[in-house]
Each structure stands twice: as C-alpha cells, then as structure tokens.
C-alpha cells in the first residue's frame, strides 16, 4: 500500500518529524536500501527495530517489511533486561537501530551471547561498545546497499508475519503476539468502514511502536496517501499547540492523553477547528471526556475504538453523538459499539454459552483479524484461543477477558474485567506479572499489585502490598526497574504483617484498596 502511493506521487509529504518533512519518495528510498541490506545480511522471518521517534524508526519498519520479513519493535525506554528477553523470544537475528539509540542498544546486545547483525543506517562508524561485542556484526551507513532501480517486492503470503508485539504476561514473561499479513490487511480493509481519509489529511502519531495502535497510525495514514505528524516528547505530553500548529485533521490517542488536557483546562470549546476525525482507543472512554473533546473539536467525528493486540489493533467502533449517545453510556463510559470488517463478536457466560438479550458476559472475538495464537507458547494459546461448540465457526475465538453487555440498540458496552488486568495510560498491565517480579526481587511471602489511583479509564499507575519482604524498598524498586517497563514499576510499596482475606479465603483486593484510600 505504501509503495503504490510512493511510486505514483513520490513528492507528496509522508512524514513530518523533528520539524523536517520527508516525502513518500524519500521514505521509500530509505526503506528500499534497508530492505536490500537486510536481504543480504539478515536471517530468519523476523527483524527487530530498536528506534524511537526518528525517520529511521519508520523507514526501519517499512524496510523490514520490504525485505519480506516481519518487524519486531523494541522500545529504548524499556529496561535492557526486558528488551533482551523480547529479542530472545522473537528469535530475530538482525536489529535495525537509529543513531540516537546506539548507546542504550549497547546495554542490550552486549548481554546477548548469540551473534546478531546490527544495522545502523545513521552511523558512519561502529559504536565504541562494538569492540566488546565481537560476536555481533556491525553494518553501518556506508555498508548499506546503494540506491538502485531494480528493486522487486518480496514474495510474501497471507500467513507470513507482518509484526510481532509483546504484551504483559501473568507469569512474568511477556506474551508475543504475531500478527500475520492477512490479519493486518483485514484490519486495514475493515477500518475503512469507519474512517474516511484522503491525501490531504494530516494525521497524528502518538504511540510508541511497541504499542499496536502505532500500526494504525502508520499504515492507515499511508494507505490513504496522507501525511503522518510525529510530536516531540513534550508535544506528545501537551499536544494542544501541536494540533493547532500543524492543522491536524485526524487525531488518535488514548483517553488518558485527552484527560491530561482536560485537567489542565486546555480542552477549550472550538480549540481544535481543523480536526475532522477524533479517535480514541486503549482504555474506556469517559462520557464527560468525550463530550469535552467534541466541544473542543466541533467539526470532527468522535469515534471510540476497541480491540486487543490479539485481534489486530481494533475491531469494534462507536461513533459518539453527544446527547443521542448519553443514554447508552453505562457508569459514565461510552460504549465500544459494534464489530466492523470481518470481525465477529459473541458474549458468553461462565460455561461459554452465548448470553441472550442484554446480560453481562465475557467478550470473545473471531474473524480474519484474530491472530493464530501466542508466539511459541502452545499452553497460553490453548487457554486464550478456543473453539465454541454450537457457534458458527470462524477460526479460533479469542477470549478477551473483558466483560460486556449488548444494549437495546445492539451496541456493546464495557463492564469491566474478569481478571486482574488493568490499563495504565493505555497499556495493558497484567498485575500478576508485577507481583511475580516484585515477589522474586523482595524475597517476599506475598505480593499483591493494584492499579492506583483509579481513573475512569483504568489507573494512573501501580502500587504494591508485601508481606514478609526481606529487601529494602529501594532495592525492590530497582529490581522492578530492571525488568519492567516504566509504566509497570510500582509507585508505592506498603508492607503488611498479613494480607486481608475475603470469605473465600483469597486476598481481599477491595480491602487493600480501602486501606490505600484511607491514607489519602
């Protein structure tokens, strides 16, 4: 899709980053040179991209795909130990990195024993740490394939992997989700039922590449021939001026980003007159926030998208209509709407029987967007990707763990979780993973993690309760920082003699939340 636009209109702007505009032709040239290089030096079906908010981050993803491989985004902000773990689980033997992340890349790859090929398209020379890592091969800017006119598209089939992302895992090990070409193409086709863009549109890119909503930003934008605008870290945190300065027409973020603007009183009526589309995903969307955004962007269509990584970006949509939608909101939360494209949705009870009428049950998803399972993990795949006797088959059904109900208008309404997963600033967090890491680090009898403080969309962060912990707080937090991404590191530690228990003799998480509320 990208190549079709780039070859027809190479001079169209494709990417604006660091105040520089890169055309489709420029981005394609970079991607082709990378692709040729990866074809020559790379091995295996996957190639990692270790980059952040740089032209080579985007050219890297495109170049990997043009080489016929799937890309594995690695976040430089994550602890080196966690990144090494993801790299090892992926099996990728080649890593593309931008010049700005070379130093932190050394902390990652110098701890990898197997030989890697490290491609550094923005570096004229190998980094100083390369001498300590003789097991790895360095490919620098001068080693990249020269520009040529004989490039051919790779022979890629629908079952080949497009990208591999990792989500939080309840056992302490991240879960890999490999999205195939057919999954991604099903999403890009289906989302056109919801969203109508054109070459003149100017789209935001707010998400890290390790967050699957970035896939929407890149490939939906470029599929329409539009231009992608990448904010600086400060602009991403306070994006009001960014929206106005660039005259963005399509905005996409988590509700948490919009909530910050609301708290700072930056969602002023009529403040975003250029926006035509306002998309939210990753967390429940509060009614008051949707209404505030609608007033700030009165000419835009506000859409609440929903979907887990395992079902390729998003698979249901609800167009917020102001007063007409207020009656459909439950607990002040905007509905997640109906499936689009090939996605099928079924609401089931505890015995996996379909829930009739408006009853609450677990949401299961089927269709072409659903991934085949977890990467190299048959046990977890068997638990989450299932067949449903008596329900029309459509491949595996994915258990989302989300509780929903179908309202009188046929729209799905979010009603909470079946497990201890929470959303922190749009990121899925399995609290059991935090508990596992903390328990091991603290040498504790018990560790219970909770989302705190609660928000309408999830939680602002994570707090930890411990019994029998041997290590001091700072050592526990340091251990968590080494193994967990920043948004999962506990912001508070509370030590107890014993955990409160409920009537079933299980840890009473509500009682722990009440304890924390009492400290406020």
Image (cartoon, rainbow, N blue to C red):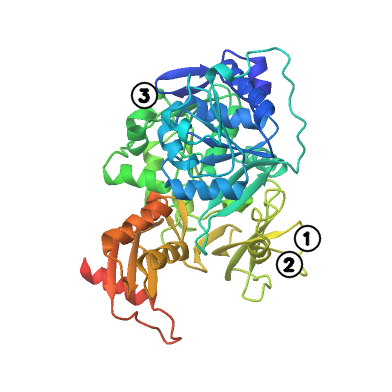
Q: Determine the residue positioned at 32% across, 58% down.
A: 477
Q: CA distance from mark 2 to mark 1?
A: 7 Å
Q: Residue at x 68, y 26 (%)?
A: 40
Residue at the disc numbered 2 = 388
Give the residue at mark 1: 393
Where does residue 128 sit, x and y in percent of width and height?
A: 42, 28
Label 1, residues with CA under 10 Å away: few <14, some 14-19, many ≥20: few
Q: What's the mark number on residue 245?
A: 3
Residue 356 visible in the snapshot: yes
Which badge, 1 or 3, is on the more N-terminal residue?
A: 3
Name the foreground residue: 514 vs 376. Answer: 376
Quarter of the view holding residue 435:
bottom left
Q: Residue 296: x, y in percent? A: 36, 37
Mark 1–mark 3 Cα distance, whole angstroms, equals 49 Å
Q: Secondary structure at mark 3?
A: helix
Q: Are marks 2 and 1 in contact (CB under 8 Å)?
A: yes
Instruction: Give the spatial CA distance, label 3 vs label 2.
Output: 51 Å
Which quarter of the picture shows residue 243? top left
Q: Nearer the viewer, residue 339 or 64?
A: 64
Q: Which of the marked residues, 3 or 2, is nearer the chain's N terminus?
A: 3
């Amino acid at each position: 899709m990208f190549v079709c636009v780039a070859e027809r209109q190479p001079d169209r702007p494709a990417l604006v980053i660091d105040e520089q505009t890169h055309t489709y032709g420029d981005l394609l040239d970079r991607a082709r040179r990378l692709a040729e290089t990866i074809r020559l030096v790379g091995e295996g079906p996957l190639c990692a991209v270790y980059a952040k908010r740089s032209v080579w981050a985007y050219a890297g993803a495109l170049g990997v795909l043009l080489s016929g491989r799937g890309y594995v985004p690695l976040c430089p902000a994550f602890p080196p130990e966690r990144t090494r773990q993801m790299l090892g689980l992926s099996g990728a033997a080649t890593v593309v990195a931008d010049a700005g992340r070379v130093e932190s890349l050394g902390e990652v790859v110098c701890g990898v024993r197997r030989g890697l090929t490290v491609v550094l398209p923005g570096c004229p020379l190998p980094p100083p740490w390369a001498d300590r890592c003789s097991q790895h091969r360095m490919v620098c800017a001068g080693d990249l394939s020269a520009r040529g006119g004989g490039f051919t598209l790779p022979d890629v089939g629908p079952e080949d992997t497009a990208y591999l992302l990792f989500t939080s895992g309840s056992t302490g090990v991240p879960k890999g989700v490999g999205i195939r070409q057919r999954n991604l193409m099903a999403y890009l086709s289906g989302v056109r039922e919801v969203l109508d863009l054109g070459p003149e549109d100017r789209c935001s890119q707010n998400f890290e590449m390790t967050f699957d909503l970035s896939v929407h930003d890149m490939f939906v934008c470029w599929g329409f021939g539009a231009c992608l605008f990448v904010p600086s870290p400060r602009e991403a945190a306070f994006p009001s001026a960014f929206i106005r300065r660039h005259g963005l027409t399509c905005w996409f973020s988590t509700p948490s980003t919009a909530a910050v603007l609301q708290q700072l009183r930056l969602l002023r009526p009529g403040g975003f007159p250029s926006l035509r589309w306002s998309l939210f995903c990753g967390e429940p969307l509060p009614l008051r926030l949707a209404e505030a955004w609608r007033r700030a962007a009165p000419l835009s269509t506000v859409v609440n998208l929903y979907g887990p990584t395992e079902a390729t970006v998003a698979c249901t949509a609800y167009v917020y209509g102001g007063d007409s939608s207020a009656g459909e909101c439950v607990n002040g939360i905007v509905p997640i709407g109906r499936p689009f494209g090939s996605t099928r949705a079924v609401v089931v009870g505890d015995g996996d029987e379909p829930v009739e009428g408006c009853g609450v049950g677990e949401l299961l998803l089927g269709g072409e967007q659903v991934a085949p399972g977890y990467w190299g993990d048959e046990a977890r795949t068997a638990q989450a990707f299932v067949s449903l006797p008596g329900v029309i088959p459509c491949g595996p059904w994915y258990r989302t763990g989300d509780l929903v109900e179908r309202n009188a208008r046929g729209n799905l309404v979010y009603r909470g979780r079946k497990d201890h997963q929470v959303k922190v600033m749009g990121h899925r967090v399995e609290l059991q993973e935090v508990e596992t890491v903390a328990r091991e680090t603290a040498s504790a009898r018990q560790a219970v993690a909770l989302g705190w403080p609660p928000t309408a969309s999830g939680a602002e962060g994570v707090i930890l309760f411990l019994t029998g912990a041997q290590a001091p707080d700072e050592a526990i937090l340091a251990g968590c920082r080494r193994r967990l991404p920043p948004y999962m590191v506990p912001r508070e530690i509370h030590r107890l003699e014993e955990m409160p228990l409920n009537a079933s003799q299980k840890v009473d998480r509500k009682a722990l939340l009440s304890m924390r509320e009492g400290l406020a």
